[in-house]
Amino acid sequence: MTSDVTDGSTCGTEAILDTWKFFSQNFGSILLELDSLERGALEGTLVATTTTSITITRNTLRVVFPHLLSEKRTLFWLACKLIDQRLVMRGQVFFQWNDKTKRVVRIHSQADMVTSMLPIVGNLENVSRVFEGALVTPEFNMVPDISSDSQYWMQLFC
């Protein structure tokens, strides 16, 4: 990777590693499986099709979905449905290669959390409630405002 590699919301190898650290510390039993690897439509791109499995732990709820545990307790029932659930998500990781530097300059990943969460919480309205105030997006990425200062969040919650 180049020193200024980006994932669209953070820049630099340390920032990318901080993002990965955030996920590995706040979700249980992460398993990332490579299903296929193909050349992308654009020159110098590769597309990896993946299956990502995660477990929603108490720590996940506390750090990633804190609004479900708020003092108001109006969404606590969603937290109860999600605790210890295993989500299996289909996704893709896009890599952009720079021929001059012979390194990756951009990584973009996405995994479909909605489809795997829907049967657990019952309907799309409840899925929406889960992500309203979460630190991750339905595409299993950090919320952009959070990822730009992931070091701060790591110190605060971990």
Image: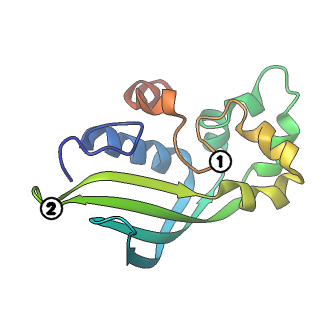
Left or right of residue 152: residue 113: right
Viewer-closest of 105 and 150? 105
Residue marked by disc 1: 138
Query: Would residue 139 be seen by someone viewing this image from the given angle?
Result: yes
Tell me where residue 6 appears, x and y as whole percent: 32, 43
The image position of residue 135, as x and y in percent, is 59, 35
Q: Nearer the viewer, residue 43 or 26?
A: 43
Q: Secondary structure at mark 1?
A: loop
Coloring basis for residues: rainbow
Whether residue 158 can be seen here: no
Which residue is most to the top? Answer: 71
Q: Is residue 146 left or right of residue 18?
A: right
Disc 2 to disc 1: CB gap under 8 Å: no
The residue carrying pointer 2 sits among few (fewer than 14), some (14 to 19) or many (20 or more) residues within 10 Å by Cα, namely few
The amino acid type found where label 1 is placed reads Pro
Q: In the picture, residue 72 is in which quadrant?
A: top right
Residue 148, given in percent of the width and then of the height, sits at 41, 29
In the picture provided, is 10 more to the left or to the right than 121? left
As rendered, which of 18 and 124 lies closer to the eye? 124
Q: Which mark is residue 73?
A: none
Q: Going 67% across and 39% down the picture, which residue do you hit?
A: 61
Judging from the image, what secondary structure is the residue with disc 2 in?
loop
> Which is more toward the observer, 70 or 106?
106
Residue hosting label 2: 99
- Image quarter of residue 42: bottom left
Residue 55, compared with residue 77, is above or below; it is below
> Residue at (77%, 50%) from the top-left corner?
82
Amino acid carrying mark 2 in the image: Asp
Give the total of numbered labels.
2
Q: Note whether 94 is above or below 152 in the view shown.
A: below
